[in-house]
Amino acid sequence: MGRTRDAGCVAAGVVIGAGACYCVYKLTWGRDESEQIWEDNEETSDRAETEKKAQAKPGSVASARVEADTVAKAEVGLGVKSDPDLKAEAHLGAQSGGGLEAKARALFSTLKEQASAKMGRGGRLGVGSGTRTLSSSLPCPGGRGGGCHPARARTGGKASGKSKGKPKSKSTRPPPTAWPARRVKFNFPYKIDDILGATDLQKVLNILERSNDPFIQEVALVTLGNNAAYTFNQNAIRELGGVPIIAKMIKTKDPIIREKAYNALNNLSVIAENQGKIKTYISQVCDDTMICRLDSAVQMAGLRLLTNMTVTNHYQHLLSYSFPDFFALLFLGNHFTKIQIMKLIINFTENPAMTRELLGSKVPSELISLFNKERDREILLNILTIFENINDNIKSEGFASSRKEFSRSSLFFLFKESGVCVKKIKALANHNDLVVKVKVLKVLTKL
């Protein structure tokens, strides 16, 4: 029974020792995986060459195999003792210490001494300054997945013995000094919803005029636009010379800045005195509104400003050249753009002096689709209002007999001569919406 227990203890010690040997192998000596690959490749190539020679000389096959086996056994048995030797040494150590723990310690010490002895005899690894480095006679395995760093090997630094997988590519990121300096956030002196006096408004106008920072310009424009919603500040901004400063921002390429500038000018254009200042820029606003991105926020802001500027008849003639663009936008725009452009056209139709320019404008034939009963209620009411005003102006201005004056692609031909528009309006007489039905009946009674 005692011998069986001793045998079990020895077996356990061998297992523990094997684990310890593996740890020592990995942490203290362990060969690089890439070196093992090279050795396997070299061994394979050697055997291939031997087989080729054997094929060339059939009589030397046995001797070549014996030679290859001898080399392999010599490499494997380099400085490593056999299992009986290990068991004997472990048993001797166990007798001196006694117990399982003593046997494990003895086995570990034996394995450690063997690893140290072999490390001192190894020719593939060099020792420099207390750390492992690749031998100078060996090529760096970094290109084959090894962990060697050539610069560290040359300078005597540490070289990793583990395989690092794919080599890391050089970073294309510029040095820190190449990055632009981080801009310090500007503390605007007021909140955008503060109601300011004349002195504070002057400060905001000065900031807007002198700053080139888009963030500061946007905050200043929003602040001025919110204050321009009040009548006393509308006069104050004009008297402080704020209209040219705000209008200067519509020349920038930033659509957000232009949108905020249009909003501020829109609030200022409520009173006639400010319209007299803004009229200088109305053509520029119209051109930018037509060429900017369709249905964008800046386009909507520009249309609102143009609508306010054409509420009266004083400046409508400045936009008569853009009538074909307005009708094209009426067809192409989304629901909200259609609503806003209709409000603008209604302002022109309410001025009999603009009737000739409107009737001669080139319009897309698809514009007739706006009279479809599937359309939104607000769109139907607005297009019916436009038709009603145009029809009234034709009668009052005597354009009914001037058919030869207008082309077949004109608004006059679409509304009066083709007869399609009248048919569409009559089809709306049975509309489900009572307000639309009343409007249709009113228009039909004037035909």
Image (cartoon, rainbow, N blue to C red):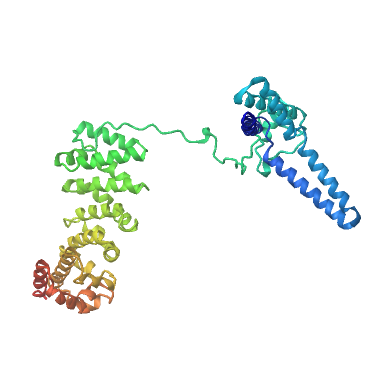
Quarter of the image where one finds residue 84: top right
Q: Is residue 12 left or right of residue 346?
A: right
Residue lying farthest front?
1
x then y, percent, for residue 87:
70, 31
Residue 213 position, x and y percent, is 37, 38
| Residue drawn 21% across the image and 78% down it | 420
Give the residue at x 29% y 55%.
299
| Percent coordinates x, y for residue 400 in the rendering | 17, 76
Image quadrant holding the N terminus, namely top right
Q: Is residue 250 visible?
A: no
Query: In the rendered image of this protein, does residue 304 appear above or below residue 411?
Result: above
Number of numbered discs: 0
Q: Name the quarter where the C terminus is drawn.
A: bottom left
Residue 191 shown left or right of residue 127 in the figure: left
Query: In the figure, 394 relative to 166: above or below?
Result: below
Would you identify the image quadrant in which residue 234 lies? top left
> In this view of the protein, can residue 335 be seen by the observer?
yes
Q: Nearer the viewer, residue 218 or 63?
A: 63
- Quadrant position of residue 237: top left
The residue nearer to you, when weighing 338 against 359, is: 338
Is residue 167 shown above or below 87?
Answer: below
Q: Please state which of residues 327 and 362 is positioned toward the viewer in this rendering.
A: 327
Q: Position of residue 197 (x, y in %)?
A: 18, 33
For the residue pair 131 and 54, the one nearer the viewer reads as 54
